Structure formats: C-alpha cells, structure tokens
Image: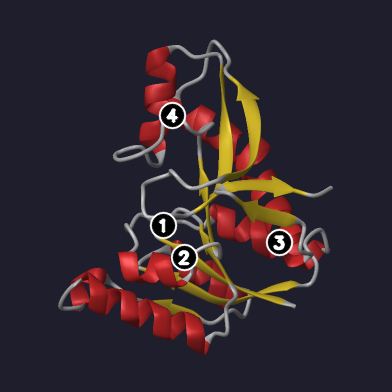
Amino acid sequence: MLNIAVLVSGGGTNLQAVIDAIDKGTVTDAKITLVISNRTDAYALTRAAKAGIETACIRPKDYFDREEYGRAMTEAIEDAKAELIVLAGFLVVLPGNFVSKYKGRIINIHPSLIPSFCGDGFYGLKVHEKVLERGVKVTGATVHFVDEGTDTGPIIMQKAVYIKNDDTPDILQKRVMEEAEWVILPKVIDAIAHGRVVLKDNKASVIE
C-alpha cells in the first residue's frame, strides 16, 4: 500500500479527483494519509476532513527560515508515513532541504504542456490567460517529478486539450481540469503504486 501526502493551497479539485479515484477503485494499493495546506481557509482541508483524511496547516511564515519550514514539513510527512508527495495546486516553493530529501518521491500537476507556459509566475488561471493570449491551438496538463527548479523536473505523463474559439480563461481552466488534470494525476499515482514509473538518467517513463 502506497501512503500519499497531498499538498494543497486552494479548493482541492485535484485532491478530490484522487479521493474519488481511490473510492472508485481506479487507483488501487494507495491511500492518502495526510493533506497539508499552507492556508487555514483552503477548502481542500474541508474536502479531506469529509473523506476522513488527517489534515495539517503548515505555513512558511510561522517559521524562522525556509530550512526550519522544510524540517516541519518533513516531520509531518514522516509522521504520516507518506512515501509519495503529491503537489495538487500547492503555491509554495518547497525548501531545498525538503526537495533533496524526497527526490524522486514528489510529483506535481501543472495545467499546461510543459515546457510551454510553466515556470515562475505560471500558476492557476494565469496559465490559461497566457495560453489564450498567445493564441496556441493545443494546451493540456502535465504530471512531473519535482526537482530544485520550477516545473523543471522529469515529465511523467501529459494529456492534450484543444482550444476552442469561444474559450475564456475560466472555461479553458475547467476543461483542462476535467479532460486532463483529473485524468492523468490518478493514472500516475496508480502507476507509481504498482511500480510502473521508472526514473532513470533524469527521464521518467511509464510501463504499460
């Protein structure tokens, strides 16, 4: 059984997608043992509580520096016996000591086809605004391993979503969630739970 910690900052729609996938049996041999947010008012914490999942609010501003914050996060992860850390709309840059400790065990879902529309400043609705501003015809979502950079870790899985002429950022955001994010994040978690994700030479592959 793969124990998972999910890190969230907002509404937790991707968290809900994982909870639902585990409940339906499309993700097996995995369970969420902890949900951490950096915000006390994150609705994701309510979603977790409703599902009977332990929650914690760990805020960077409550610690002396980023290293101390990283140690607090590590302690929570270890207490929950989490083996995989899933960033699902987590808007805090993780401390280096935390990332290095869990290298190859942290994944992130990003609402674009990396390497397009990613990196510093590209998060949430801003991604979809830039996609429409640029006039690209295809966008999507990416699940990748987390490294010391921003959205620079090895790509595990991507799914494309086509742009429509009448798309607004809000409409596009919802469709990318429904057609891509909520599909590939549970798929990757299930693949990891069954040892089907291989990380070698800084490249990730999924064994079907």
Q: Amino acid at mark 1?
A: Phe
- Report the disc number at residue 128: 4
Mark 4 → mark 2, Cα distance in angstroms: 22 Å
Mark 1 → mark 4, Cα distance in angstroms: 17 Å
The residue tagged 3 is 192
Q: Point out residue 51 in the picture as x, y percentages from the top left corner.
A: 63, 74
Q: Earlier in the sequence, mark 1 or mark 4?
A: 1
Mark 1 → mark 2, Cα distance in angstroms: 6 Å
Q: Amino acid at mark 4?
A: His
Callout 3: helix, strand or loop?
helix
User: Quick check: marks 4 and 2 in contact, CB under 8 Å?
Assistant: no
Query: Foreground residue, 204 or 33?
Result: 204
Mark 3 → mark 4, Cα distance in angstroms: 28 Å
In this orientation, does residue 95 appear?
A: no
- Disc 2 crowd rating (10 Å Cα; few below 14, some 14-19, many 20+) is many
Q: Earlier in the sequence, mark 4 or mark 2?
A: 2
- Report the disc number at residue 90: 1
Image: 133 above or below 47 = above
Q: Residue drawn 17% across and 73% down?
A: 65
The residue tagged 2 is 7
Q: Residue drawn 38% across and 77% down?
A: 73
Query: Foreground residue, 18 or 87?
Result: 87
- Disc 1 crowd rating (10 Å Cα; few below 14, some 14-19, many 20+) is many
Mark 3 → mark 2, Cα distance in angstroms: 17 Å
- Disc 3 crowd rating (10 Å Cα; few below 14, some 14-19, many 20+) is some
**How many discs mark residues in the rendered view?**
4
Q: Residue drawn 74% across and 66% down?
A: 193
Image: 55 above or below 98 = below
Q: Earlier in the sequence, mark 1 or mark 2?
A: 2
Q: Amino acid at mark 2?
A: Leu
